[in-house]
Image (cartoon, rainbow, N blue to C red):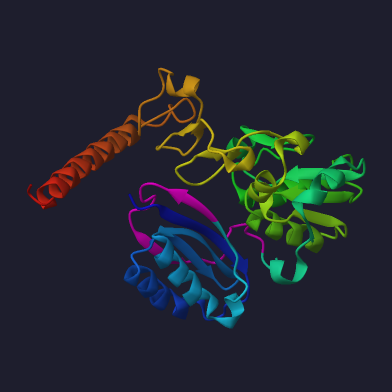
């Protein structure tokens, strides 16, 4: 059985011609039967693609042939079945939405801290450690002592910073701030935002949580719980071993076994986190699940018919 390579990538770099890049990039991916989603904006590129290893390498080589993307890095993972069904290249105002004009990670991002040095930094008493991820991500795992801003989206972080920068807030005296996220893209942008707000000593975890879990032995780790990931694994632990969580296909929240056994859980329709959605919405989701099941059944029939006769 073929193993499919998944490549998660991003790079903040000025791409004033990003609109002109959309069509040739999509064509390159389609020619190599690569699936997934890539976002293009004037501030750079972000996304995840999957396919056979040689095809992924061909697309990455095409991207890196542009001198501006020559140092583009990616994180790899493997799957036994294709994790995506189609290829999309989207044009965006931002490759990760903060919603604040003038934030430039290419010029203003905070100081990178390697995973090997992270524990020492966040243990310092004058450092405020901020988890830049969404509330449902933080709920299943974070670093010891990290602050949870309780944001539902990344674009809510500036309001939290403003609130905590007021007299009596966590950030009132502009302390040293260490920020982290899953793979690095959000904390790279959030540290640039912090510097724009006048914070001078701002740090972020190089490679994000995933690089930390991959690099630091569990015995030396200050990470507690699992790390939410935006693919079929749902979550990973130390050494990037897949976790035991499921995911609600209706709202995207990670689910424990107990939550999946709840009376409020209906596969693809609702879970304890979104069970208060309207009946009209639930009916739409049930119909979508029915259509997906029919499509899967038809594909199995087509595959069986295409097999050589003995």
151 sits left or right of 219 in the view: left
Residue 83 belongs to magenta span: yes
Residue 12: x and y, percent? 63, 68
The image quadrant that residue 26 belongs to is: bottom left
**Residue 44 visible at all:** yes
Residue 82: x and y, percent? 36, 51
Q: Is residue 78 above or below residue 40?
A: above
Main secondary-structure element of the magenta-colored stretch: loop
Which stretch is magenta? 76-100
Q: Residue furthest front?
A: 310
300 sits left or right of 188 in the view: left
Q: Which residue appears at 75% of the width and 62% of the height?
A: 192
Q: Is residue 26 above or below residue 270?
A: below
Residue 297 belongs to magenta span: no
Between residue 215 and residue 198, name the one nearer to us: 215
Residue 292: x and y, percent? 25, 42
The image quadrant that residue 108 belongs to is: bottom right
102 sits left or right of 276 in the view: right
295 sits left or right of 16 in the view: left
The image quadrant that residue 266 belongs to is: top left
Q: Which residue appears at 43% of the width and 19% of the height?
A: 261
């Amino acid at each position: 059985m073929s193993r499919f390579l998944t490549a998660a990538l991003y790079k903040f770099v000025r791409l004033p011609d990003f609109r002109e890049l959309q069509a040739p990039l999509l064509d390159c991916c389609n020619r190599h039967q690569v699936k997934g989603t890539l976002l293009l904006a004037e501030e750079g590129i972000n996304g995840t693609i999957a396919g056979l290893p040689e095809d992924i390498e061909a697309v990455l080589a095409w991207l890196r042939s542009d001198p501006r993307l020559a140092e583009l890095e990616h994180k790899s993972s493997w799957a036994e079945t294709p994790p995506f069904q189609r290829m999309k290249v989207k044009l965006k105002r931002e490759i990760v939405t903060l919603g604040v004009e003038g934030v430039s990670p290419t010029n203003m991002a905070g100081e990178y801290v390697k995973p090997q040095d992270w524990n020492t930094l966040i243990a310092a008493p004058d450092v405020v450690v901020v988890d830049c991820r969404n509330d449902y991500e933080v709920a299943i795992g974070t670093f010891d002592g990290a602050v949870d801003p309780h944001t539902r989206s990344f674009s809510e972080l500036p309001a939290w910073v403003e609130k905590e920068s007021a007299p009596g807030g966590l950030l009132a005296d502009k302390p040293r701030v260490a920020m982290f996220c899953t793979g690095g893209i959000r904390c790279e942008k959030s540290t640039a935002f912090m510097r724009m707000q006048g914070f001078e000593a701002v740090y972020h975890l190089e490679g994000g949580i995933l690089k930390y879990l991959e690099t630091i032995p569990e015995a030396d780790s200050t990470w507690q719980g699992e790390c939410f990931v935006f693919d079929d694994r749902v979550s990973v632990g130390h050494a990037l071993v897949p976790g035991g969580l499921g995911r609600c296909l209706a709202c995207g929240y990670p689910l424990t076994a107990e939550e999946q056994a709840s009376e409020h859980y209906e596969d693809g329709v609702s879970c304890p986190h979104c069970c208060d959605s309207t009946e009209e919405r639930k009916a739409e989701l049930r119909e979508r699940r029915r259509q997906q099941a029919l499509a899967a059944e038809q594909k199995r029939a087509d595959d069986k018919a295409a097999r050589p006769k003995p």
